[in-house]
Image (tube, helix red, strand yellow):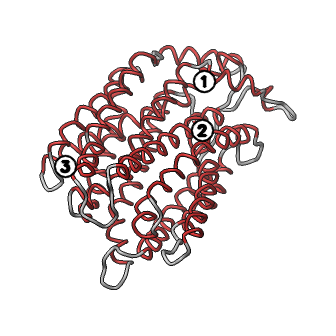
């Protein structure tokens, strides 16, 4: 979105940066409201699955509309279109992704099964996002003007339509095929039963496991979305070869599958403690980010360290998502209500907040250093691009590792005791 609006639609980088920040402030209200509504939903399809299917369809439509902007429009129309459509995307995205995140905690109550489910989820999320990276540059070039140069908005618009056609059926399929097995306490499901806001807030702010996950999710959002935004600029201006961007898709798919599908469950089995496993995952990812600073994409060592950092980051991210159901169990154990959707809303909020703050700060930083679209960049801009791909992600990963080590002390035995107590309360033997 950022490079599309700055370089091809002609919107100032500062305007794009401001939009990302303001919309995330709006999200602070939007996410918890939708989370509470999802928790209160009563339907034969469950509480969360209808939101995933309908929200996914609406989100896809608005994504297509966002990239339908044209460089020939008056500037006021460009900016207004960008603001309105992006806000609508934000609402629809929350309506889809937040209940989707809540599903992990209601499909099963077994913490190891949740880890496996999160691993599978991240494997396919990695395939999806990196497949997009893999085909993005090629699609943009092929669908742009007849001379196959990425100098028109047309290439971006058509590439987005192709991506939506590929992606939307998978969202609908996941909503249709999932089953919500873990139900709230019986009294919470009674007709007319209310979920007091004060108790919901206690489930969040009186839950240290949820709080450290919120912090970690913010840092991951800053890291993942910040790097994703910067990569387009990095390969265009620092590496001098935009087509190398496609290699990140190949590497990302391979390391994502290995990291999420194999390393994530292995770390959990090794420690039986998600806090320790997360510490190792994020710590190693940070360690391998550092050397990237001294290499360029034309060198094999760049891709070796890029692959290793991505492998452990995706493993840690999968582990992090597996914590959400456990955190909801702890909240129910302590406060007597189950609010997977409400907690997932804040997880979604913090991911998007980090995902807004990261790109916003990095783009504003580039602008302050003298970034000029479609020109050779000065040394300060190039150095900032390099830092954003290496040192900055390394520091963020290490901070995450330290946080989980100090706070997340729930091991498998402690969680099993909590689940057994919850089942006793429900009369399940």
Point out the residue furthest to the right here.
192
Q: Nearer the viewer, mark 3 or mark 2?
A: 3
Query: Given contact means CB atoms under 8 Å apart, are the residues at marks 3 and 2 in contact?
Result: no
Judging by the rendered image, the residue that carries numbered circle 1 is 329
x 45%, y 30%: residue: 216
Determine the residue positioned at 14% across, 56% down: 298
Quadrant of the snapshot with the C terminus: top right
| Label 1–label 3 contact, CB within 8 A | no
Does any portion of residue 330 appear in the rendered image? yes
Q: Is residue 176 visible?
A: no
Quadrant housing residue 221: top left
Secondary element at tag 1: helix
Nearer-N-terminus badge (3/2): 2
Mark 3 to mark 2: distance in Å? 35 Å
Q: CA distance from mark 1 to mark 3?
A: 40 Å
The answer for how far apart the CA atoms under marks 1 and 2 are is 12 Å
Q: Which mark is residue 303?
A: 3
Looking at the picture, does residue 341 appear above or below residue 360?
above
Tell whether 368 sits left or right of 56: left
Percent position (x, y) of residue 254?
28, 50
Report which residue position mark 2 lands on: 102
Residue at 53% x, 37% y: name it.
350
């Amino acid at each position: 979105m950022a490079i599309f609006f700055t370089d091809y639609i002609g919107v100032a980088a500062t305007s794009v940066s401001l939009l990302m920040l303001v919309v995330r402030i709006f999200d602070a209200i939007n996410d918890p409201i939708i989370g509470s509504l999802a928790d209160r939903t009563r339907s034969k399809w469950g509480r969360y699955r209808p939101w995933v299917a309908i929200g996914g369809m609406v989100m896809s439509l608005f994504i297509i509309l966002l990239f339908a902007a044209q460089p020939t429009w008056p500037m006021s129309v460009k900016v207004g279109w960008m603001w309105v459509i992006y806000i609508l995307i934000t609402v629809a995205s929350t309506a889809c992704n937040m209940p989707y995140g809540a599903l992990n905690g209601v499909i099963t109550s077994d913490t190891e099964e949740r880890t496996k489910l999160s691993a599978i989820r991240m494997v396919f999320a990695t395939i999806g996002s990196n497949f997009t990276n893999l085909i993005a540059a090629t699609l943009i070039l092929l669908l742009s003007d007849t001379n196959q140069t990425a100098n028109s908005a047309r290439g971006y618009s058509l590439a987005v339509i192709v991506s939506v056609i590929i992606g939307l059926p998978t969202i609908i399929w996941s909503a249709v095929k999932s089953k919500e097995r873990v139900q709230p306490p019986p009294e919470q499901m009674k007709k007319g039963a209310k979920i007091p806001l004060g108790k919901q807030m206690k489930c969040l702010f009186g839950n240290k496991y949820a709080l450290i996950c919120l912090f970690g999710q913010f840092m991951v959002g800053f890291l993942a979305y910040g790097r994703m935004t910067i990569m387009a600029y990095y390969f265009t201006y620092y590496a001098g070869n935009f087509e190398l961007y496609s290699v990140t898709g190949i590497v990302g798919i391979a390391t994502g599958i290995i990291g999420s599908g194999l390393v994530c469950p292995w770390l959990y089995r090794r420690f039986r403690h998600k806090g320790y496993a997360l510490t190792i995952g994020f710590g190693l990812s940070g360690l391998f980010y550092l050397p990237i600073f001294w290499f360029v994409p034309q060198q094999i060592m760049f891709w070796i360290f890029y692959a290793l950092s991505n492998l452990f980051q995706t493993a840690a991210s999968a582990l992090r998502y597996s914590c959400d159901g456990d955190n909801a169990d702890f909240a129910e154990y302590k406060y007597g209500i189950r609010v997977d959707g409400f907690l997932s809303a804040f997880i979604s909020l913090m991911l998007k907040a980090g995902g807004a703050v990261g790109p916003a700060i990095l783009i504003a930083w580039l602008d302050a250093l003298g970034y000029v679209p479609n020109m050779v960049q000065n040394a300060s801009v190039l150095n900032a691009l390099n830092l954003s791909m290496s040192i900055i992600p390394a520091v963020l990963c290490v901070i995450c590792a330290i946080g989980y080590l100090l706070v997340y002390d729930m091991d498998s035995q402690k969680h099993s005791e909590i689940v057994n107590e919850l089942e006793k309360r429900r009369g399940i033997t």
